[in-house]
Image (tube, rainbow, N blue to C red):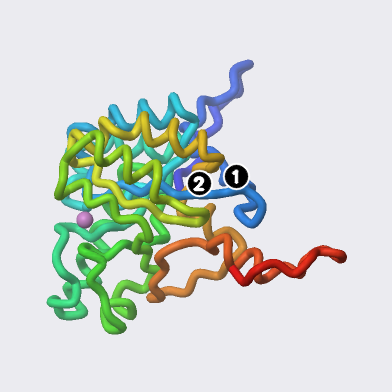
Amino acid sequence: MREPAAAVPGGTAEEPRRPAEPPPPRKIDCGREKCVSLTFDDGPGPYTERLLDTLKAGGVRATFFLLGENVHGHRDVVRRMALDGHEVANHTWSHPDLTELPAASVRSQIRRTQKAIEDASGVEPTLVRPPYGATDERVGRAAGMPQILWSVDTKDWLYRSVSRGARVGINQPDRGDIILYHDTHKPSVDCIPKVVDGLRKRGFTFVTVSELFRGERLEPGEVYTEGTPEAELVAASPPPPGTPAGPPR
Ligand code: NI
């Protein structure tokens, strides 16, 4: 958080100029809307600013799991993420397998990254994604934040194909899914305009991970891979009176 701009001594007709603040969180009900979260890992990098342009043009808010070691070279980009309404989150400092590290190193990987992101953006992350999705109870305890994995793995880092990245990203997601891309690869960034169009045509609303879980209590150290899938939403609500019994779903 930043301090408000100091009042001008003596007072003037003009409002003191305030630092720009991130927009407030939106109240999107993912129990009613068909929500999906785009997430981008390992950045920021040389393509991230272009990705932000794409997301802005499409009115999309996404979640960025940032590497602390990449923040200092792209501080303006990280600040813009927050101001554009994206969620900035923690992907450790240097992308180690946290299960191989002593607890003190896990904590340091996460703490340094929290500080770098907060210094650049003014926002303190509340979510962490362990590199490779590699975690265990000990890492969870040391991380001290909800751990967010994914439910749609585009494997974009492996195939590095615009057409494949678009096809998987458009066709595979279901309601509540968390989709994994890496903005450090050019083809991944290049496919996003198509993915945004395609998912919107399928009726999806793009939300950040925190918006996806709005109303749920995320526990520090716990692992989350997706929001509530449609099947569970249907099961949780009683059928309206007079509904004929259908086949089991
Ligand atoms: Ni990663």
- Dividing the picture into quadrants, the one containing residue 104 is bottom left
Q: Residue at x 31, y 42 (%)?
A: 120
* Amino acid beneath label 2: Val
Kind of element beneath mark 1: loop
* Amino acid beneath label 1: Arg
- Dividing the picture into quadrants, the one containing residue 49 is top left
Image position of 36 with respect to 96: above or below: above
Q: Which residue is mark 2?
A: 207
Q: Which residue is mark 1?
A: 26
Left or right, 99 with reference to 148: left
Which quarter of the rendered image does ligand 1 occupy? bottom left
Whichever of callouts 2 and 1 sits on the residue coming sooner in the sequence is 1
Q: Residue at x 64, y 57 (%)?
A: 31
* Residue 128 image position (x, y, % from top left): 34, 62
Near-viewer residue (180 or 122): 180
Q: Could you tell me how far apart the alpha carbons at marks 2 and 1 are, in whole angstroms? A: 9 Å
Near-viewer residue (189 or 49): 189
The 10 Å Cα crowd at callout 2, few under 14, some 14 to 19, many 20 or more, is many
Foreground: disc 2 or disc 1: 2
| Tags 2 and 1 touching, CB below 8 Å | yes
* Residue 35 image position (x, y, % from top left): 54, 49
Left or right, 22 with reference to 90: right
Q: Residue at x 42, y 34 (%)?
A: 196
Extreme residue toward the right, this view: 242
